[in-house]
Amino acid sequence: MNTPNKTNHWKFFIFVAGMLLGVIGLLLFFSRVQLHRQVLEAEAYFLKSQFEKSMNSLLLGDLDLEDPWLSSKSLQERLITQAAVESLKIPQVMGVQAYNQSLHPLHLNTSVETDISTLSSFDQAIWEGWSSRELPSDTFGLLVHLADEEESYFIEFQLEKTLVLNAWNRIDSTLLKQGSLLCLSALFLLWIIFRALTRTIQTKEKLLLEKTEVLKKTNQQLTQAYKTTSLGSLTGHLMHALNSPLTTLSSLSKDPDFLSTESSREDTHQAIQKIHQLVRQVLGSLKEVEKGEISYCLSMKEVLETAAQKLNKVSPETSLRVVNHESLCDPVDNLQASLTLAILSNLFQNSYEAQTGAEIVLEGKRKGKNWELVISDNCGGIPTDLLPRIFSPVVSQKTGGSGIGLALSKQLAESMEGFLQLESSDSSGTRFKLTIPALEAETTN
């Protein structure tokens, strides 16, 4: 018995683990990007709030000032200039640059000489409230938007890049630790689930293999049982068929003038020929059933024609009419053909032994997945008291009959997974139907 293959289980585990680690990695990457952005956003809002706070404080103190230099500028620009100086007191701020609504830089003492921000940076600052960019000399620029009823301004704070990078590095370190712990925990949990599922699958696979082995042995035993039934039925058919010629020989042997006349010698010769023919036929069928292989196929039409030829040799005075259908061209394997011929031979024998000059009609057709052969005669039917037991051994309406012909025929039909049944019986005659499974398409190819 084969053991379950564990290699595929581990391949599946590695695949799922890789997928899980990939998902965790993507989540950590997006978290890292978002957290880096939140650091800059928090810094931008902090600096903006501090700048606005400084402007509000300076506004209260500068209302009474009449300095000519200050009066030459707008109140807003004066407040921005003073608030920029106050912003330099914040440790991380290295410089402050301001832009008016027309995106022209204001000349501030706190400005660091840098390139003007791009138009997209201003648009982002208006849309999101802030934008960022890297500046020369290891500095970082945070551009915020100051909205005013009369005119809006943009303030860009130059920050030391090291401070931002340090914050980012702390985030990366924390994410790395948490991500590693999460990956290890996920792998451990996955391994536990995998082990539990693998053991369950292996147990079921082992049980399935055991059941398959039992089923295989059972099928072998059933095949042997069917073969034994077929062999026994064919042997019984031979014994039943030999009964008639042996009876003839027995009668001839009691005649004092046995073999003295031409007719006696002819009857003896025919009886011996019939015995030889039956023995050869049954021995051939026994070999095919014992071998259990499909070595050749015939059409159902050929099987019925063979049955008619054999009947004509055994009982020339019996009339047999075969009703042909187009479906009779479909194939029948050698095993079915041998057993079908034996069944038809028994049914024909019952008819011509019941009445001299019997008329038999044999109709064969394909119906769905089965063959249906209908055999009817005009031999007066079966007595009513025998109908319930016609397929039981040693039940016969003929004087000296063995009563096993129909019983053997039914066993032969069942050995092919078919069945034989009596459809009708009255004063006009009997009608039997033999149903046989047809060959599957792949078998016939």
Image (cartoon, helix red, strand yellow):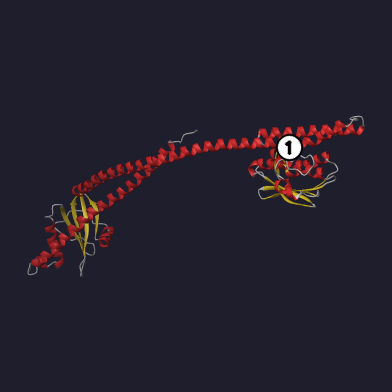
| Residue 192: % across, % down | 35, 41
Of residue 114 and residue 8, the one placed in the foreground of this image is: 8
Quarter assignment of residue 221: top right
Quadrant of the snapshot with the C terminus = top right
Q: Position of residue 441 (x, y in %)?
A: 64, 44
Q: Is 259 displayed left or right of 10 in the figure? A: right
Q: Residue at (41%, 41%) from the top-left corner?
A: 200
Residue 177 screen position, x and y as percent = 25, 43
Between 434 and 167, the one lying in front of the other is 434
Residue most extreme to the front? 385
Write down the residue under mark 1: 237
Classify residue 412 by image quadrant. Answer: top right
Q: Nearer the viewer, residue 329 or 50?
A: 329
Name the element at disc 1: helix
**Relative horizontal placement of residue 404, taking residue 212 as reference (left or right):** right
Q: Is residue 151 left or right of residue 426?
A: left
> In this rendering, does residue 44 appear at all?
yes
**Residue 297 appears at what percent x and percent y?**
70, 39
**Few, some or many C-alpha atoms within 10 Å of disc 1 (few <14, some 14-19, many ≥20)?**
many
Residue 172 to residue 86: above or below = above
Q: Nearer the viewer, residue 108 or 122?
A: 122
Residue lying furthest right in this view?
261
Number of numbered discs on residues:
1
Residue 137 appearing in the image: no
The amino acid beneath tag 1 is: His
**Residue drawn 56% across and 37% down?**
218
Question: With respect to residue 422, does 255 lie above or below?
Answer: above
